[in-house]
Amino acid sequence: AGCAWQVGPWSVCSAICGDGEETRRVSCPGLLEEDCPGERPAERQACRRTDGCAWQASAWSECSAQCGSGVQTRTVTCPSGHAEDCPSGLPVLEQACHATAGCFWHTGNWSSCSVPC
């Protein structure tokens, strides 16, 4: 009799962005857990943090054009899976590009000589 559950402080959430888990130490100072009244307090609980959320962007795609003006795209995600957890202002998803690798001159046949011999 006279025993009470001893509980430590919750740990830091295991996630820095999104759903995670907190843990704490729970013990009964008696010889048996039955010496402490009531149910054993929880040692784990769910937690959620968003202060460590930052947008993650993929590499830019190749230019959509092979010669001249085109567009490059990329994907941007928030690691938590919820856009509202990341800072406001979604990063740019597409940008203009200019490609020259597929450019080459097109030549036609020569015209007839403009001056007679």
Image (spheres, rainbow, N blue to C red):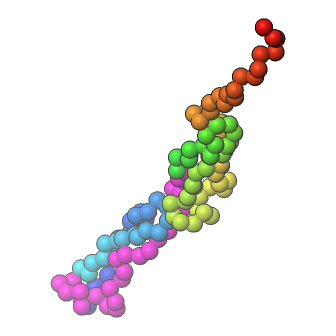
Residue that extends furthest to the top in the rendered view of this protein? 117
- Is 27 above or below relative to 94? below
The quarter of the picture where the N terminus appears is bottom left
**Residue 5 in the image, given as x and y percentages of width and height:** 32, 81
- Is 33 above or below relative to 108? below
Q: Is residue 24 magenta?
A: no
Report whether 46 appears left or right of 75.
left
Q: Is residue 51 visible?
A: no
The quarter of the picture where the C terminus appears is top right
Depth order, front residue of 106/59 = 106
Depth order, front residue of 107/98 = 107
**Residue 77 in the image, given as x and y percentages of width and height:** 55, 58
Range covered by the magenta-colored residues? 30-57
Report whether 74 appears left or right of 19.
right
What residue lies at 69% left-to-right and 26% top-to-bottom? 109
Name the dominant secondary structure of the magenta segment. loop
**Residue 102 in the image, given as x and y percentages of width and height:** 59, 36
Q: Is residue 102 visible?
A: yes
What residue lies at 58% left-to-right and 51% top-to-bottom? 74
Depth order, front residue of 81/14 = 81
Residue 114 sits in quarter: top right
Residue 12 sits in quarter: bottom left
